[in-house]
Amino acid sequence: MPEPMEPDSYLSTALAPPILHHVGFVVASIAQCGAGFASSLGFPWSGEIIHDPRQNARVTFLRSSPREPAIELVEPAGENSPLHKFVARGGGLHHVCYEVSNVENQLQQSRAAGCLIVRQPVPAVAFGGRRIAWVYTPERLLVEYLERGQQPGPSV
């Protein structure tokens, strides 16, 4: 008889556990602060800014190496962006993002843990069409889940 799974185990042992992909930081303008932000961290920065109309945001990624989690700078990309309120309060740390094997399974687990599903899965331009979903935890942490996949496009 198999041993019982630990309480923090995932829905299926066949699924890889979530791994930290990036930390999102909201800024008023990536163009104005991206180079300084990268310099202060000692990270290289390509200067690439990705527009995602579905998220109503522009993003860029700073990473010390391909194997390390990134810092994502996020700015509002239009008058209707929900990020404007966050920028008006000074911006700053916004969310953490975990890469998961199956976003629907992760959302089931999140609901069972008392989380509020903020946004159902949608394709994201910044991740080559891989799907993301947003969850707000009872501890007031905004979490983005990025589904692992092999779709073409940037592998940030």
Image (tube, rainbow, N blue to C red):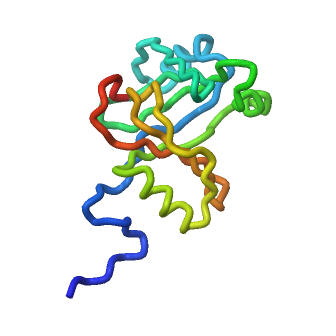
Tell me what residue is drawn at x 40 percent, y 19 percent. 44
* Res. 42 image quadrant: top left
Pick whichever, 90 or 60, lies toward us.
60
Tell me what residue is drawn at x 46 percent, y 25 percent. 125
* Res. 84 image quadrant: top right
Q: Residue furthest bottom?
A: 1
Left or right placement of residue 9 versus residue 90 in this view: left
Above or below, 14 against 154 in this view is below
Provide residue 17's location: percent of width, then percent of height.
Answer: 34, 56
Left or right placement of residue 107 versus residue 139 in this view: left
Left or right placement of residue 129 versus residue 137 in this view: left
Above or below, 17 against 82 in this view is below
* Quadrant where the image shows the C terminus: top left
Give the total number of marks visible in the rendering: 0
Tell me what residue is drawn at x 63 percent, y 56 percent. 116
Provide residue 13's location: percent of width, then percent of height.
Answer: 28, 65
Q: Residue furthest left?
A: 1
Pick whichever, 56 or 36, lies toward us.
56
* Res. 79 image quadrant: top right
* Quadrant where the image shows the N terminus: bottom left
Provide residue 60's location: percent of width, then percent of height.
Answer: 49, 22
Tell me what residue is drawn at x 52 percent, y 14 percent. 35
Above or below, 1 against 94 in this view is below
Above or below, 46 against 54 in this view is above
